Amino acid sequence: MTCRISIIQEDTRYCYVCGRYGTEIHHIYFGVGNRKLSEKYHCVVGLCPYHHRGNKGVHQNRELDLILKKTAQEAFEAHYPNIDFLAVFGRNYIFNN
């Protein structure tokens, strides 16, 4: 089951970008192992199909992808102050692009 609890967004039923109701869960950090870590640490957001899989969606839009990664890192560091983000996800998205 996909995690719908988010440290970034109060209600993942609404698109984080446009506010539309009816979303798909986007794992902000994806790839080998990171999808499970995104779920474990609730680094997910709800995105409407357009902002998730569309032509300008997060999987096609590097700028939106980085914004979400930076936002999630900030939320992670606030929510889990005793856990090193870099040790978990292997990259600092706030200072590196």
Image (cartoon, rainbow, N blue to C red):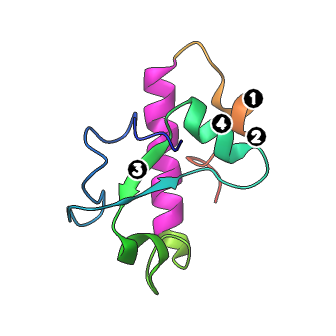
**Horizontally, is 29 left or right of 19 in the view?**
right
Q: Which residue is mark 3?
A: 45
Q: Is residue 93 above or below residue 65?
A: above
Q: Are marks 2 and 4 in contact (CB under 8 Å)?
A: no
* The quadrant where residue 15 appears: bottom left
Front residue of 63 and 23: 23
Which residue is rendered at x = 37% and y = 77% of the image?
50
Give the amino acid type for the residue marked by disc 4 in the picture.
Answer: Leu
Label 4: state its secondary structure. Answer: helix
How many neighbours does mark 1 have within 10 angstroms: few (below 14), some (14-19), or many (20 or more)? Answer: few
Question: Mark 2 to mark 4: distance in Å?
Answer: 11 Å
Q: Tell me the mark number nearer the camera, choosing from 2 and 4.
A: 4
Q: Is residue 53 magenta?
A: no
Residue topped by disc 2 = 90
Farthest residue to the top: give it: 82
Q: Name the residue nearer the viewer: 94 or 75.
A: 75
The crowd level at tag 4 (other Cα within 10 Å; few <14, some 14-19, many 20+) is some
**Residue 23 x/y as whole percent:** 33, 60
Q: Are marks 3 and 1 in contact (CB under 8 Å)?
A: no
Q: Which residues are magenta?
A: 64-80
Label 3, residues with CA under 10 Å away: few <14, some 14-19, many ≥20: many
Image mark for residue 87: 1
Which tag, 3 or 2, sits closer to the chain's start?
Answer: 3
Q: Position of residue 65 (x, y in %)?
A: 52, 64
**Closer to the camera in the image, 82 or 96:** 82
Dot 1 falls on a residue whose secondary structure is: helix
Mark sitting earlier along the chain (4/1) = 4
Q: Main secondary structure of the magenta part?
A: helix
Q: Earlier in the sequence, mark 4 or mark 3?
A: 4
* Cα–Cα gap, marks 2 and 1: 6 Å
